[in-house]
Image (tube, rainbow, N blue to C red):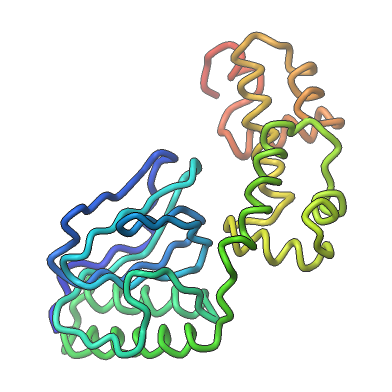
Amino acid sequence: MHIEYVGIDWRHERHFVMDRPQGHSTWVIIQVTSAGWWWAEEDSQPLPAGWCVVMPPGLAHRYGTGGRPFSNHWIHVEGIDVGALPQRDPFAVADPVAVSQMFREVHREWTTRATDWEAATAAHLELLLIALRRGQAQASRPRVADVRPLQALRSRVRSEPGAGWTVARMAAEAGLSPSRFRVRYRSAFGLGPLDDLLSARLDHARALLLDGLTVAAAAHRSGFSDLSYFHRQYRRRLGTTPAGSRDGQGD
């Protein structure tokens, strides 16, 4: 076994795509920590946050963002036995947080290189492969068709962020109970529906401010009824004030 490289929490811009038409010379083990898309040969499908992919050497593949910033863990390694793990096809795991922690343990041993680090790294990688096999066997894989209604709903929300969206309304339109909707939404997109809605409203407000609207008008048209709350969230998440965006100044 030889690990070529380990990447943890690599963050990419919203238009990032990793395209390997000739595949890679090593096995590639991936866990996405935010939702994206996966392509292999002529097939493509949504890649929900927490899902994993195991790619054998030399097989063409392509993955990346679905239009939002994207992050993932990955390992390039030679000489492993993946057993019954799916190859090429993305799969869910029962406990993605535990799997993510195992990626971190491999990375920690591989980068710190303490005494017996090669043996420790190999041991942690084997534990990761076991966790992937067990987790994949336990998880019930959602069908792609189950994800697409949520994507359509999300597109509507992001195109009309100023509408009176609530979790109850979004869940009803998705045909789910509010609790089930929250779980499915987070699994598909890597964040909760209200957090995603807030992000969409702030993005919309910023675009209106850049077009020259007043702060109050941009806030109202983006769905904010409380101007002080709008100011707090705008500064906390975008790193400047609404007026600073409108005037083209940082803060």
Viewer-side residue, 47 vs 251 = 47
Classify the position of the N terminus by image quarter: bottom left
**159 left or right of 69?**
right
28 lies above or below 39: below
Identified at 31% across, 66% down, the residue is: 74
Measuring from the top left, give residue 224's x and y in whole percent.
81, 31
Identified at 55% across, 24% down, the residue is: 251
Identified at 67% across, 59% down, the residue is: 185
**240 left or right of 8?**
right
38 lies above or below 133: above
Viewer-side residue, 16 vs 198 = 16
160 lies above or below 38: above
**30 left or right of 28?**
right
125 lies above or below 186: below
Viewer-side residue, 116 vs 128 = 128
Identified at 86% across, 49% down, the residue is: 169
Measuring from the top left, give residue 108's x and y in whole percent.
30, 74
| Quadrant of res 222 | top right
Q: Residue furthest front?
A: 42
